[in-house]
Image (cartoon, rainbow, N blue to C red):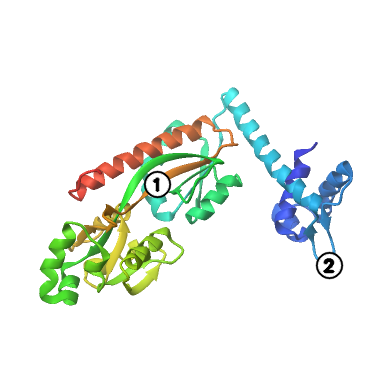
Amino acid sequence: MDFRDLYYFSEAAKDLHFTKTAERLYISQQNLSTHIKRLEERYRVALFERKPKVTLTYAGARMLAYAEEMLAREGDLREEMKEIQGERRGELVIGASTPRLRVLLPEVLPRFHMEYPDIRIRTVDAYAVELLTYVLENKVDIAFAPIIADQPEMIVETMHRDNIFVVCSDRLLSRVYGLEAFEIKASCARGCTMDKVARLPFIVPNTRNQLSREFYSCFEDQNLTPNILMETAFPLYFFPLFSDGTAAGFLTLSSLSEGLSSIRQPVNYFQVYRKNEALGHTIYSFQNKKRYEPVYLKRFKELAKECFGGIEKMRLSYLGLSPK
């Protein structure tokens, strides 16, 4: 069997529009149809219904499942043969959120590139649920994200713990709480729960973000309604509004320490507690169990773990905190 037939068929199955697929792959529509026809003749089935619109037949859906698996395995075979031959070329696709990539890549890429100069890095920025889907679909080689649920089809390894903090200025506390501000600050320094800061206006992650779900859950647990000034995909970009007293933030340790380095005015950062436990995200790496793991991917994972561990210790020290 020609793997090109499977490849072009699987690409056509994604679009269900032959003209669009042919244009995207820079081949003629006749050439695309030839590859599909060869598969249909080999297995004596119709893979697509052409009218009233293009859809997969039952045979086509089953063929697609096998095609994706076979193409992934063929890619693994290529990678393993390259390693046997001592070839150190290829592409590594890394999935993570933008804030996490901003932490990881500046630390890891210089060392990785020195060891594997011919491995091209490509990143995929997406939410955790999407990243795990991409791993299973072999669109991402390794993803870094908080765990969603049991993932029996994946290799899952713990990378680091990213605790969550409320960030606000003395100016904001005084404006909102008046004479109570000093007492609120002292209490939050011992552990911040949402009832202590419920009146503060917050800039928070948008509703598709896991950090946002944590934020709202903290309020719901105490039957409180948060005071939302703004929702945004990247609260860190608005860190100056935290330091000038416009609003409070709800940030991970990684984002917090990055933001602190960019401002001049001091701010308070209070560890958030929920149900008597310090709130945070455990970050994991995810890989598809069925995929071959090239040596350069193993090395990237090692460097990532060192990076997360080193950054966590450095940032905890910078914030005057002790590792949990």
Label 1, residues with CA under 10 Å away: few <14, some 14-19, many ≥20:
some
* Visible residue check, residue 111: no
Q: Do the residues under discs 2 and 1 have CB atoms within 8 angstroms?
A: no
Classify mark 1: helix, strand or loop: strand
- In the shown orientation, is residue 18 left or right of residue 170? right
Who comes first in sequence, dot 2 or dot 1? 2
- What is the total number of numbered labels drawn onto the structure image? 2
Q: Label for residue 283? A: 1
Whole-percent x, y for residue 178 in the image = 13, 76
Which of the pair 223/61 is nearer the observer?
Answer: 223
The residue identified by callout 2 is 52
Which residue type carries mark 1? Ile
Mark 2 secondary-structure assignment: loop
Q: Is residue 71 above or below residue 25?
A: above
Q: Position of residue 242 (x, y in %)?
A: 25, 67
Quarter-wise, where is residue 219 in the image? bottom left
Residue at point 57% right, 49% down?
A: 134
